[in-house]
Image (cartoon, helix red, strand yellow):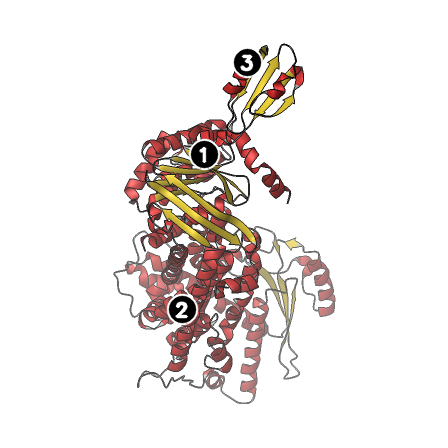
Amino acid sequence: MRNTLLIAVREFLDNARTRGFWFGILLVPLIWMVASQVPLLLARKGTPTRHFALIDTSADGRLGAVVSGRLKEVESRRENLRFREWVAPRLRSDQPLSGLDPASRPWERLQQELTPWMKDDAGRFTPPEPLHRRVALSKELEWRGDRGEFEARLRDWMREDRTFRPEGSDREVSLFAVAILEEDPASNAPPSLRFWSVNQADTQLRERMGEALSREFRRREYARLGMDPVVVDQVEKGQARVIGLDPRKAAGEERVGAADLLRQWAPSAFVYLLWIAVFGVSQMLLNSLIEERSNRILEVLMSSVTPLELMAGKLVGVAAVGTVMALAWIGSLVLVTFWMIHTSGAAALAPDSMVTRLPIELATLLGDSWLLPAFGLYFLLGYLFYAGVILALGSTCNDLKEAQNFTGVIALLMMVPLVSITFIPKDPNGPVATVLSWIPPYTPFVMMNRVAAHPPMLEVIGTLVLLVVSDIVVLWACARIFRIAVLRTGQPASLAQLLRWVLGR
Amino acid sequence: MSVALELRHVCKSFGTFHAVQDLSLSVPVGSVYGFLGPNGAGKTTSLRMILGMLLPDSGELSVLGSPSAMAVRNRVGYLPEEKGMYRTMTAVEAIAYFATLKGVSGRVARARARDLLGRYGLGAFADKKIEALSKGMGQKVQVLASIAHDPELVLLDEPFSGLDPVNQEVLEEVIVDLKARGCTVLFSTHVMAHAERLCDRLIILGGGRGLFEGTVAEARRRMPVQIRVEWVDPTQALESLPGVRSRTRQEGGIWCLELDSGASAAAVLEACFERSLRLRRFEVRENDLHEVFVHLVGPGAREATLR
């Protein structure tokens, strides 16, 4: 027992001292942070102001006003949002914020109202540069009333990717788009938008303009048909009340909310973690064994400890590495989520929103549900299964190259649970999920994914017993192979030879 | 005389290959015992059986009074033929780790590791990682790791291979020190000079069998005595000299006489005087272990190498 512990401690420290271990620990929260922050950062800093021209051919210039109004509305909403992010860390946290509805006020007014609660050194908010800025066309591109002729000139100009200095601007800009708004006053046809742009990937401006024109057309048609646009607006806003109810929940709490969705999909995230943890630590185990084999350390070890002590020590040591990694991942995910929401300003201004409550819901979910115990249990049982196989096969290989022949096959087998991650939550108790649950190498991943769907108790216990029995068989076979193979040199053993060792022939 | 290690009629085969056949030996407590033999003679297999890593097919073993080395493993030290260490551990950590696996407490193991490294010239490298040490240094660290738990019996498989002459001397010093404190040392080697200098007793293996077991002097006596003689007047009389098995003429009129087993050089010299043979040279050549080794295992070892 003492030797098992000594080997386990050395194994743990050996892995914990590597850069790979710390990289592995930091990788998951880092990916989470990068995946959620980079698009926001790019949206904030990376997108330059795009300049566009608007040519309104309608008789009264009404279409241009509608489109400009809509773009202004979008821009002020963006400014408001940015203000919220700016103001959150500048508020004295002990001051009450109740009664403020940030969505209903422009930022200028909100800033005025919040001034008494803001820190002394808060400074003043500077609104961001607009995403789209309307500019007047240069003289050579001016609209002369003939669309065909104008578009011919425009096409040449835009193809050459030229720049110009708009009126009132101190620098040259390139033209992102030119929008031509048209309507036929003689007919009741909807207006049209001819949107010229060399950038076809950014469709945001085109969609917003199209949406504004469509809305305006509908409003006008309702009026023409004698319907009150205000009433129509109200009617259009009306939506059916959809209430999701879960019969398994207690009376009065049947309503399905965002927290329930989190509950349903969180296991899938845990399956990912489980997969990375099991696969990662099995690989560590293989590397460590191959190092000892190729450096001829095993023979010295074998003069001091029994093969079983050595095997158990390695299994425990690497399992501890995996456990620390998994716990660090789960903890850091909650912390990073909390930090992101706190710094975004949502926590200060909308304390009851789902976004704000996400880390709390996540923490509650981890504390209350079977997720963590299930994760721990299935990590242990899944790890023992794969580690047993890896140790048995790895003990017959002289170097990593030989071992890769085996690990390639194992990696291929391990792809099945990875592929099943997305479809199992949609039909967690369906035939595919049920069949996969009864295949021991897949049981940990599939059952972990089904945990929120409350699979039949018989299946839970049955698959668990089968998995435990499989682990015992695998470890027993592994021990038999290990004690023979570990001191052997030369060619790796064939499968028939492995079988003979297991059967003791 | 108490015995630290004893093998009685031990056999081990792998499939149809007989690695060790009917091997018997006895190693007295506190002695240095040589395990000599060419490649494939069964040295490593024998050592692995002594350590309990392999089980003999037949025969009996006694290691420090126990039928299984695993039962007394904390009292046994072992250096395998193929040397290796954890590359990322420091010299102190590596030695201490293996000592703790032999039952020594962590604190004592670290103190002993530093003491050993200092004593055998590696004090300055105690906190260096193994990967930063030269091959020879790493090998010395491994030797020290095999004795840091203060064992009663140390088994060293080819400990001198890969070491430069200076470090070979250091290793000889380690073995002498071990013997001085009452430890029994068994080491295998190809280099006869080490065995001649260090061993109280030795065994010569060939083809898995024990070809000779005894002291170095006894081994030397296994070879016929050779005398180099030179006569002033060449004569036929030397043919009638007693106990001479064969005679070969060499360059410069020198004859090499090989004596029968049990015949003495003094009797030959006396017979020369009796026959009034005028001698210019009479030189008795002492056999060294190398010749004994080649004489015993030579033909078989060559065949095994060529197979």
* Label 3 element class: helix
The chain containing the residue under callout 2 comes to A
Q: Determine if marks 2 and 1 fall on one subunit.
A: no
Task: Point out which mark residue B137 bears.
Answer: 1
Q: Nearer the viewer, mark 2 or mark 1?
A: 1
Q: Position of residue B271 (x, y in %)?
A: 54, 17
Gap between marks 2 and 3 measured at Cα: 97 Å
Q: Which quadrant holds residue A33? A: bottom left
Please tell me whether mark 1 sits on a helix, a strand or a loop. helix
- Give the position of the N terminus of chain A as an image quadrant: bottom left
Nearest the eye: A297 or A214: A297
Q: Which mark is residue B274?
A: 3
Of A288 and B164, the residue lying toward us: B164
**Distance from Cα at disc 2 to Cα at disc 1:** 46 Å
- Disc 3 crowd rating (10 Å Cα; few below 14, some 14-19, many 20+) is few
User: In the image, what residue occupies the spot 62% across and 80% down?
Assistant: A190
At label 3, the amino acid type is Glu
Q: Nearer the viewer, mark 2 or mark 3?
A: 3
Among the two numbered marks 1 and 3 on one chain, the one whose residue lies closer to the N terminus: 1
> Measured from the top left, where is residue A419 in percent x and y?
53, 70
Residue B269 relative to residue B54: left or right? right
Residue type at the position of mark 1? Met
Residue drawn 45% across the image and 49% down it: B10
Say what secondary structure mark 2 lies in: helix
Q: Chain of mark 3?
A: B
Asked whether the beta carbons under mark 2 and mark 3 sit within 8 Å of each other, the answer is no
Point out the frontmost of discs 1 and 3.
3
Place of residue A373 in the rendered image (x, y in percent of width and height, measured from the top left): 34, 69
In the rendered image, residues at marks 2 and 3 fall on the same chain: no
Which mark identifies residue A378? 2
